[in-house]
Amino acid sequence: MGIISKVLNSKEATNEIARNSSVLKVMDDDTVKKMQDILFDMYKDVKAVCDKYEIPLFMIGGSALGAVRHHGFIPWDDDLDLSMTRKDYERFASIFEKELADKYILNAPNYSEKPCHKYPRILKKGTYYRALIDSDVESLHCIFLDLFILENVPDNPVHRWIKGNYCNFLYIMSWEVFLWENRNEEVKQFLMAGGSLNYYSRIIIGFLFSFRSSAKWFNTFDKAIQYKNENSKLCGLATGRKRYFGEIMRREQWLPGVKATFENEEVLLFSDLDYYLKNLYNDYMQIPPPEKRERHNVCEVRFPEDKKSEENYK
């Protein structure tokens, strides 16, 4: 697999490396359950505000799969993925400080002084979570919800091809510069597990484009993926696991959504759920064997009551 393919399919490539990594830590079952409880409490806080302002809030990705297959969290999953349309996100960001800033931080491109990712994250104050490739801002090392914005997509195929490839270019540049800025020995060991070409190619790309900070690249990427035509027939998740072209569907396949049950609570999923999940996971009702399950790049996690985070790992 070439370096560009690895970056554009970084979720799959990273999972492959992570399964054989000695750098990452594995959370035990009790810690995973604690993490899920905190994430779901965070979701309920965000959902309450979204309901107040009539903002539809969708569960997506592995969280949507969990709702369908397990009626809650996938047992080994330790994150929660959410989505809303760009128009609704702009409303959400405008009321965030008023409604949620006492307990949470919204870190996002074109919102925060130093965004730490290509898409918004809602961070819970008073917690600690350090990923393998993480921001050097200590206050941003928190347990988080990922928020993937549903964007309008050009119907014209030429316009879509140009825009999508430009966005994928910016995706690569922003993340590789972030990797360059936050490189350390742990990151090197991890990426070298995928081969020296994997590590040095990415470091070189990050260095070459570090004439701009990753924060500025993230801001540019966030602006590039936007498309203001609310009447376009297509929508997509440009920041999703399959990047700009991989998660494009007709608008009616996304919206207005369908209801499902997640941890005994009613949640909202995308309308054409079967098509959406097959696109991401193929035979999504088949439970993967342990060696094929996704593993996230966590180095350390602490909860408010913890004294020694290392006790939470096996």
Image (spheres, rainbow, N blue to C red):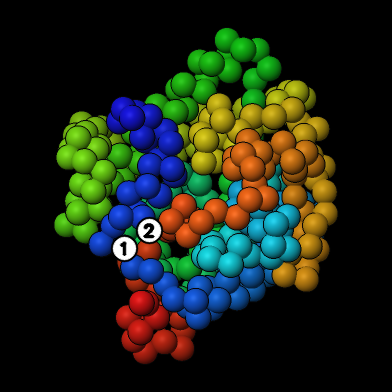
Give the quarter of the figure containing the C terminus. Answer: bottom left
Instruction: Specify few, some or many for label 1: CA neighbours under 10 Å numbering under 14, 14-19, or 20 or more.
Output: many
Vertical relation: 3 (above or below) 272: above
Numbered label attached to residue 297: 2
The answer to whether residue 312 is visible is yes
Query: With 200 as the anchor, is 67 left or right in this view?
Result: right
Residue occupying the point 37% across, 77% down: 313
Q: Residue at x 48, y 68 (%)?
A: 143
Residue type marked 1: Leu
SS of the residue under disc 1: loop
- SS category of the residue bearing label 2: loop
Q: Which residue is mark 1?
A: 24
Which disc is residue 12 wearing?
none
Task: Decide if residue 26 is on the left or right side of residue 182.
Answer: right
How many numbered dots are placed on residues in this image? 2
Counting residues from the N terminus, which is met first, the one under dot 2 or under dot 1? 1
> 288 or 38, which lies in front?
288
Q: Is residue 180 visible?
A: no
Residue 242, percent from left and from top? 52, 35
Residue at x-position 40% and y-position 80%: 312
Q: Are marks 2 and 1 in contact (CB under 8 Å)?
A: yes
Q: 174 above or below 260? A: above
Structural distance between the alpha carbons of marks 2 and 1: 6 Å
* Left or right relative to 237: residue 3: left
Q: Residue at x 50, y 80 (%)?
A: 30
Residue type pointed to by label 2: Asn
Q: Position of residue 17 (x, y in %)?
A: 32, 49
Q: Quadrant of the N terminus?
A: top left
